[in-house]
Structures are given as structure tokens and as C-alpha cells.
Amino acid sequence: MAEDDKLAMSVDDNNFLKIMDNEVYVDDENHWVALLPFRSPRQLLPNNREQAFQRLLSLQRSFKKRPDMKEHFFDFMQKVIDNHQAEPAPQLQLGQECWYLPTFGVYHHQKPGKIRVVFDSSAEYKGALNDALLSGPNLNNTLIGVLLRFRREQIAVTADVEQMFCGFKVREDHRHFLRFLWYKDNNPDKEIIDYWMTVHVFGNSLSPAVATYGMRKAAEQGETEHGTDAKHFIFRNFYVDDGLASVAKEDDAIDLLWRTKALLAESNLRLHKIASNSTKVMEAFPV
């Protein structure tokens, strides 16, 4: 938990943390891997492939009305596939439990040409995936706490973790619950096939807790080599994927940022979009 004052955790939140403590691990490529923590007693999920198919047909109709949206959507999906965040899924065994995530696009209000594809874990079909999962506790620091600490010293720095949720892998046997329908080779002229997500997705209620938990595990693992202050920065000065800190001297800010970048990079997490009120700090991290 963050050190800011929090309400007492629920039984479900404690169960989530116990599952994470027992099941999260680092794979051979230094990715943190987490399962999907199901509620107990376990709710069996029906096969909702037809629902996902109908949602994709609806999306196709939207593409015909909005060619620009179609282009943005396919560009986004190509990046997801190129980054190995999604891949063609293996064939299901007869009667094997699974879940299909319908998709939809959301545009950034300040960037009309930038779309984010959301995997709709709240879609209802005799229940919903999010209903079957423990969403986990709110592990975030309080925003007011982060902002107050940000104002303490003269040199201010900000940064964020690129695609934070996608930095954490899903255990392979649970990827069947993150299946979705899309076009083979990301080509709209080819057949629709089954894919699955290999990472935790924007749309799952548990993804914020998984990502914050995983990033703090990375900080603990890297503390000895990269410093307690780098761990402290991650634990105390992040609000979701945004880091805000202040230090007394420019050289200390540069050193802290380089060590934090290196710590996170060891777990395949990228600290980027570094900004500061110091020209010297900015020159140390050219865009």
C-alpha cells in the first residue's frame, strides 16, 4: 500500500494482495507476469464469442461511416501486434472455458487523431469478465500527497511510464479470458480470427492495481543496485503512471532520473516524457 493515509482494505482487497504475493513472478525476459485473480467461489464464464462477433460487425459499420476512425483503429492494432501485446490465439479445446473481449475506440479530447482501443471487460453476457475478477485495492498515492511533495524543493521533474498496463504480462493459461476477434494479419480484407492479449489491458478493472503492484515490485528488486531514493520515487511520487518529484539540486535530479530509468528498464518498463523547470535537467534528457 502507499504510505498516504488510506481507508482499511476489504476482504477482497486483502485476497487480491495475497494472490499477487503468491503468484506474480518474473519470466525469462525480465517481464513481470501476473495471473487474473478470480473471485472465490469461482464464477464459470460462458463462451461469448457470438457477442464479440456482433460487436465487431457493429464496428465495421462504424468504419464505413468514419474512414479516418478505421485508419486510426488499424494503426493502433498494428502497434499492439508489432509490440507482441497481442497474437493469434491457439485453438480452444472442446468445452474449454474462455472469454472474448469486444473492442471499441476512444479518442483523446486534446488529440483528435489519436485513438485508444479499449478491450471491453465490462461487456455483459450472462455476467461480465470484470464481475468475475477481483479488482484489487486502490494502491495509488493520494493526488494531494503527490502534489504537496512535488512542491517541496526548487528543482521539479515529471515523467511517465510508457503504456504502463501493457508492461505487465498475463500468465499464459489465463490469456484465454482475454481473447478477441480481429482480422488476420491486421488486414480488413482477410478473415476474422481469434487473437489473445498477452498483457494486462486498458479496460480490465484490475489492471491499475496489477500495474502499480508490479511497478513497486520492480522498485523493490532494483533498490540495491539503483538506490533507495529511486525506489522511494516510485513508491511515493507516482500517481498511476505519472511521476512528479522535486529535489534541491539539478545534478541530483539528473542522477535520480537516470537511476530510476535504469531500474524500470530492467523490468522492460520505459520512463519517458521527462520534463523539468531546469534547462540543465532537460538537456540531460533530449527528446
Image (cartoon, helix red, strand yellow):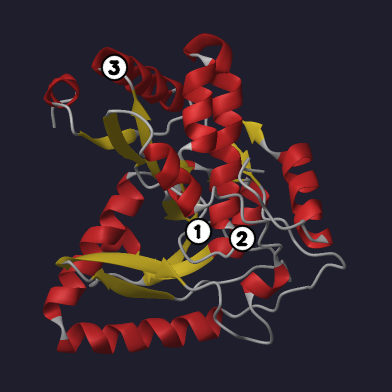
Q: Secondary structure at mark 1?
A: strand
Pointers 3 and 2 in contact (CB under 8 A)? no
Q: Which residue is mark 1?
A: 196
Q: Is 173 rendered above or below residue 91?
A: above
- Tell me the tag on residue 227: none
- Tell me the tag on residue 176: 2
Q: Nearer the viewer, mark 3 or mark 2?
A: 3
Q: Position of residue 35 (x, y in %)?
A: 67, 49
The residue positioned 69% from the left and 63% from the top of the image is 93
Pointers 1 and 3 in contact (CB under 8 A)? no
- Tell me the tag on residue 249: 3
The residue positioned 28% from the left and 70% from the top of the image is 190
The residue positioned 31% from the left and 73% from the top of the image is 106
Q: Amino acid at mark 1?
A: Trp
Q: What is the quadrant of residue 191 in the picture? A: bottom left
User: How far, Cα to Cα, is label 1 from label 3?
Assistant: 47 Å
Residue furthest to the top in view is 225
Q: Amino acid at mark 3?
A: Lys
